Image: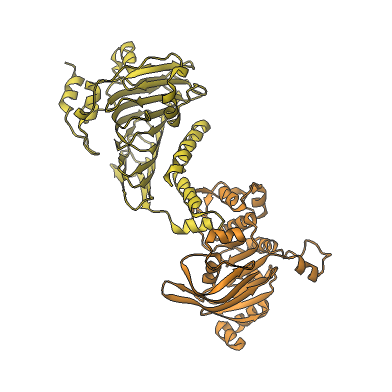
Amino acid sequence: MLRIEDLQVKIGDHEVLKHIDLEIKQGETHILFGPNGSGKTTLLMTVMGYPQYTVTAGNIFFKGEDITNLPLNERAKMGIGMSYQRPPTIHGLKTRQMVEICAREKIDVADLAGKVNFTDFLERDINAGFSGGEIKRSELLQLMAQDPDLLLFDEPESGVDLENIALIGNSISRLLQRDFHVDPEMTQKQKKLARTKMGLIITHTGFILDYVTADRGQVLYDGVMSCKSNPQEIFNCIKKMGYEECVRCSN
Amino acid sequence: MSKIKEKALGAAEKKAAYGPDLDLSSFKHKAGKHAYKADLAGIPEAEKAGMADAGMILSGEKRTGSYIQMDHSPVHCSVREEGVEILPTMEALKKYKGLKDYWWKAVDVGADKYTARTELDFHNGYFIRAAKGVKSLFPVQACLYLSEEDISQNVHNIVIVEENAELHIITGCTTAPHLERALHIGVSEFYIKRGATLTFTMIHNWGEEVAVRPRTAVWVEEGGTYLSNYVCMKPARSLQMAPAIRLMGEGAVTRLNTILVARKGSEMDVGGSVHLEAAGTRAEIISRTISTGGNIIARGLLVGYEPGVRAHLECNGLMLAESGNIRAIPELDGRVAGVEMSHEAAVGKISQEEIEYLMARGISEAEATALIVRGFLNVEMEGLPAELKQEIDRVIAESGKSLM
């Protein structure tokens, strides 16, 4: 379980997140909505453990442990993984090596890459000249190898062409143990109980909702968390009335 | 007196265009003799480790031939493949009556005091020749070894790759473990004939106070290829070199890769120039330099004389310490319209963003840094036999560990 309590975060002198409370129970996936600059990426980066995001108050608990001051790599080892929107290129480091690093044990990289149509990129430097969609598939491949318990997705559908959106949506669904087609015999309740993975997904377009079921939607507006509800409902509200109205009605 | 001697005498005090000036009189010009070993296994154990670190295989396995010189004495010279000839230069001069088409032709004896010194006080070196059409399977290995304190070793090497032949040479220059200060001057003249290929890999492992002044020039004829890989992970006190490659025949190609590290106290002035003199010639100069506190000047010069020639230059420097200095000086000189030449240069420290990206996948900051440095040094060396590539990777990995 991830539990965030009264979290306040600064970047430099600028206060970005204010009194954030959030709880993602085991097996749950939440969708995070919000306009540009509202602090969505900041929240993800803070949970991941980026030191530039200074926590000035509050705590983050993961699997019962206070990880507020834990370094990035320790959080990764505990089972937190992130899909980046614009990851850096590392020259001379092959995508294959990167996947191996994520896996931390011997795996069949080519087989895994095949699942996201990425076999041809394994010998290329990680992120070097990758298109928007290629970055997403590379990030998914790394997360598949890492297999974290809490997955943070920063706009997984941005820059992806329509042809690949299904591939990406379904892969995320699988990572979050939400691919319902696996065992049609299971009841909803059984599926829910069998699920252990947690997800927090930032989306702008909402396209991802066509592929990934989520338990809850939230709106982050100007650094304040508001509007907990069914994600599709929130999305429809935002589409119809815009963020400002949507936040007002919920408050 | 011969014209060459005369010219050498005239240049005996001439400072080099680049690099700190060295006082040649502060080095000993006489060295003790080392016994010749007909069998590579006879090389003293104490010297073997250093030679192995410079890429030598002392069983002679997977090598077309070997030449080993300690200080001023050739201590081993052998060939395993037909069509490849290896001799100490002095013997080759006798056998081929002064090597008049090759001796001080590509390199000007009067260039500076170091070339002059090599003529006036000449301590052998290697002569390697691949006969017409011969394609050697394994590399020839040559090791120039310094073991006597304060000595000056002035060698003159000649390499001739005859028409359509293919030759790989791996040269290891290194010093005895106890040795601190010495001077190595290496004049190298390489002649690559029509359609021939020379892959020349040089691995330098120097003692801390060693000064090094290689003077290399390469002539490449029509359809010929010269591939050079220079790796220096154990830097010298002072190194200055600027090999000059002339692509003289149509379609000649060259690629120069340099990977080097400068630690605190090191002065490394390294570069290369390529003259694209004929139609359809192509060149690429790539250097990756790391300063852990030392000073580096990374030069590169491309000169295009014919329309349609293509060349690219890349100088990247990584600064791993707060002190130290890397200056990248890429130069392009187009002498005619229609040349296609470009360069890129970048100097900086390791990006925090890259380190954090790797850490977010579960590895430590130190591991992440090591991976990024290793990636930085991972230059694609095309045309390199897998075995040599492995050797270079091994040298980089070994010395890379001590960088962190």
Res. B192 in view = no
Which residue appears at 17% of the width and 28% of the height?
B11
Res. A119 in view = yes
Image spot of residue B293 (x, y percent): 33, 47
Given residues B395 and B305, the one toward you in this image is B395
Q: Quadrant of the C terminus of chain A?
A: bottom right
Image spot of residue A72 (x, y percent): 53, 61
Query: Can you say whether A45 is above or below B269 in the image?
Result: below
Could you tell whether B66 is left or right of B147 in the image? right
Q: Quadrant of the N terminus of chain A?
A: bottom right
Image spot of residue B19 (x, y percent): 25, 39
Tell me, what hue is chain B? yellow
Could you tell whether A227 is left or right of B89 in the image? right
Which residue appears at 56% of the width and 68% of the height?
A47
Could you tell whether B314 is left or right of B1 in the image? right
Toward which corner of the image does residue B24 lie, by quadrant?
A: top left
Given residues A20 and A58, the one toward you in this image is A58
Which chain shows up in orange?
Answer: A
Toward which corner of the image does residue B254 lie, by quadrant?
A: top left
Give the number of marks: 0
Query: Can you say whether A164 is above or below B112 in the image?
Result: below
Image spot of residue B124 (x, y percent): 31, 19
Which residue appears at 52% of the width and 22% of the height?
B61
